[in-house]
Amino acid sequence: MTIRRKACIVGAYEHPTRKAPDKTVAQLHAECARGALADAGLTVNDVDAYFCAGDAPGMGANNMLDYLGLPNVRHVDATDTGGSSYIIHVAHAAAAIAAGKANVALITLSGRPRSEGSSGVAPRAVVPNVPDSAWEGLYNPVTVNMYALVAARHMHQFGTTPEQLAWIKVAASTHAQYNEHAMLRDVVTVEDVINSPMISDPLHKLDCCVVSDGGGALIVARPEIARALKRPVVNVMGAGEAIKGQLGGQVDLTWSAAALSGPRAFEEAGVKPSDIQYASVYDSFTITVLMQLEDLGFCAKGEGGRFVADGNLISGVGKLPFNTDGGGLCNNHPANRGGITKVIEAVRQLRGEAHPKVQVPNCGLALATGIGGLLGSRHGSGTLILERA
Amino acid sequence: MTLMSQDRPLGASVVDAATTPFWEAAKRGVLMIRRCTSCSKPNWYPRPICPFCFGDTAWEETDGQGEIYSVSVTRRAGPIAYAMAYVKLDAGVTMLTNITDCDLDALRIGQRVKVVFKTTEDGNPLPMFTPA
């Protein structure tokens, strides 16, 4: 069975807030759900499947589903691969629809790391039952250094430079200037990135994404339902997912799980990287983007530095427009999880509703891909390919 | 630039069925890994069931020697800078660790290192590495 053209994204909503001290996380989930349903032109009674991940307060979907009150849900999925979860949720929703288990699926994400002061760099607690904690926790792996180790190895092995990585941030900031909701709207230069404080070699402050409150939601529906709605139809064409760890001690930081999820998605969609007109690439850090571009086949392994340099990711300038909302690097990284905003901007592009300054002309085929967890130790990747019907 | 490493307070170790023999060897100054009794592959972090073939594994002593596979000096995640690293042991596995007792700014991928032990809050010796 395939999910190719078996389901459509009919609703997409990104919460406009980037700081929400006076709201609860559950409230943000509900506001996002309401926004996505309004975008789709559907109601709470239409939803019969609900998807959420680790940002949802409570046990799996139990507590949020009770809070939201959706009366007709008959299918739930709380798959959690970190920030990439919501990309995988779209694929799982499409599979549920294709299998006849659901007609209209709601996916929500929300969080308040900015208001709560959890910046994402706090050392992880050593939790005895997590099997790797006993062997790693006391070394103080934090999010940034577990990505920095990959960047350091890439530079050593392939000659990638800090300036090349900086171009990823430059491209994101060039797009963010047009997004009125973006946290960081100033266009930066390669020099700005290199001169920003070193956080964990070789990643500077401006190699890191923002910390923002907010969230987003998506509605995935059966094609017959999608065609009856007023919004442009966006087909799910293919998807892949994979989790990569330390390979039993044969650690290899030169590739990510996107090297597994990507080919699965391209095969199912029946397209190749050169067919993709727009790419949403999860940008927790600049190196996250570079690794995924290589692993998805947009360039050869080791060539990512040269590929991203000189504005190649800037819409209207380069060959592969990426993250035209400003991405996690400049726009939004709600709940420290950027997967859902990747899908949302891809939907905007396919609908022709991105900002005119960054809209890809006649965008018919787009990709959204993400890495959740820690790139340098264990992470989950989801890749999703979408087309305008 | 020169940035000498400083010891930072280490929290309590995890003491359970998976770690107790490891800490006992570490108290003798020995770094142990596990190796499969069926397929003979070493594994890290240590698992009693082989992650390659699901066979049984056994503890094995190493000489604590290796080289840096990747390293990142983390400068702004607390008051004390430290070097997060992967060290590829000559014994055949690559482990997450810290590099210490050295100039952090001089660390390089490919550099030879040897194990040193730093005491945790509860008195167990935690393996780290220092330039050989």
Image: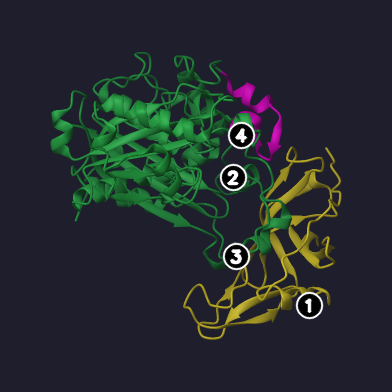
Q: Callout 2: residue from which chain?
A: A
Q: Label 2 to label 3, Cα distance in Å?
A: 21 Å
Image spot of residue A225 (x, y percent): 16, 35
Range covered by the magenta-colored residues: A188-207
Secondary structure found at label 3: loop
What's the chain of the residue with tag 1? B
Drawn side of residue A253 relative to residue A144, left or right? left
Label 2 to label 4: alpha-carbon separation: 14 Å
Which residue is tagged 2?
A147
Q: Residue at x 26, y 24 (%)?
A: A351
Q: CA distance from mark 3 to mark 4?
A: 34 Å
Where is residue A323? Give x, y as percent: 42, 28
Determine which residue is flagged by label 4.
Answer: A162
Q: Are marks 3 and 4 in contact (CB under 8 Å)?
A: no
Specify the chain shown as green. Answer: A
Q: Is residue B59 left or right of residue A332?
A: right
Quadrant location of the C terminus of chain A in the rendered image: top left
Residue farthest toward the bottom in the current orientation of the protein: B37
**Residue B69 falls inside the magenta stretch:** no
The colour of chain B is yellow
